[in-house]
């Protein structure tokens, strides 16, 4: 049994509206998330054009830190990055994984953080 994407969207919209008694916010949030995904998709396509060898690299020995909240994972992450034992990413790099987008957004970070 397949359910169409439109039926899923309507079901989610009605559930959010009935649960939180708000009807406009889910529409605006959905549009903004869609725009963000479109921008990131375009940036990733541009990455393939400008840096084709970027996606041919293999990641070896990844270090993943997982833990319960307030258990020291952030401290461990910052310690490993500060001592150059491992690498890490900031929130804006996770939101915009495209290298092309990061080149454009990095100069704007001080303005965006206000």
Image (cartoon, rainbow, N blue to C red):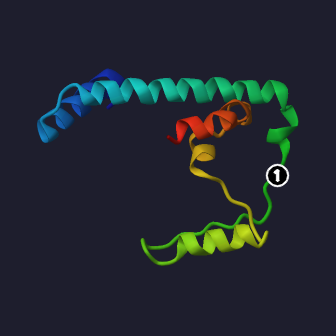
11 or 49, nearer to the observer:
49
Q: Circle 1 sits in a helix, a strand or a loop, which is it?
A: loop
Q: Quadrant of residue 89?
A: bottom right
Residue sitting at x 24%, y 25%: 10
Q: Is residue 65 left or right of residue 10?
A: right
Quadrant of the rendered image containing residue 38: top right
Q: Relative to residue 92, is residue 78 depicted above or below?
A: below
**In the picture provided, is 83 more to the left or to the right than 35?**
right
Which residue is painted at 44% across and 30% down in the image? Answer: 33
Q: Residues within 10 Å of mark 1 (few under 14, many from 20)?
A: few
| Residue 86 percent across, percent down from the top left | 75, 67
Tell me which residue sits at (29%, 24%) in the image: 27
Question: Can residue 14 be seen from the camera position used here?
Answer: yes
Between 49 and 69, which is closer to the camera in this rendering?
69
**Image spot of residue 55 (x, y percent):** 79, 40
Residue lying furthest right:
53
- Which image quadrant is residue 66 in? bottom right
Q: Residue under circle 1? A: 58
Whether 97 is drawn above or below 89: the answer is above
């Amino acid at each position: 049994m397949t359910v169409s994407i439109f039926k899923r969207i309507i079901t989610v919209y009605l559930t959010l509206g009935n649960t939180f008694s708000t009807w406009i916010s889910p529409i605006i949030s959905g549009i903004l998330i869609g725009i963000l995904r479109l921008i990131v998709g375009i940036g990733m396509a541009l990455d393939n054009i400008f840096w084709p060898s970027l996606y041919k690299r293999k990641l070896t020995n990844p270090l993943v830190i997982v833990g319960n909240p307030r258990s020291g994972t952030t401290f461990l992450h910052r310690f490993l990055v500060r001592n150059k034992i491992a690498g890490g990413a900031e929130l804006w790099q996770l939101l915009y994984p495209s290298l092309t987008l990061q080149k454009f957004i990095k100069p704007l970070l001080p303005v965006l953080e206000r």
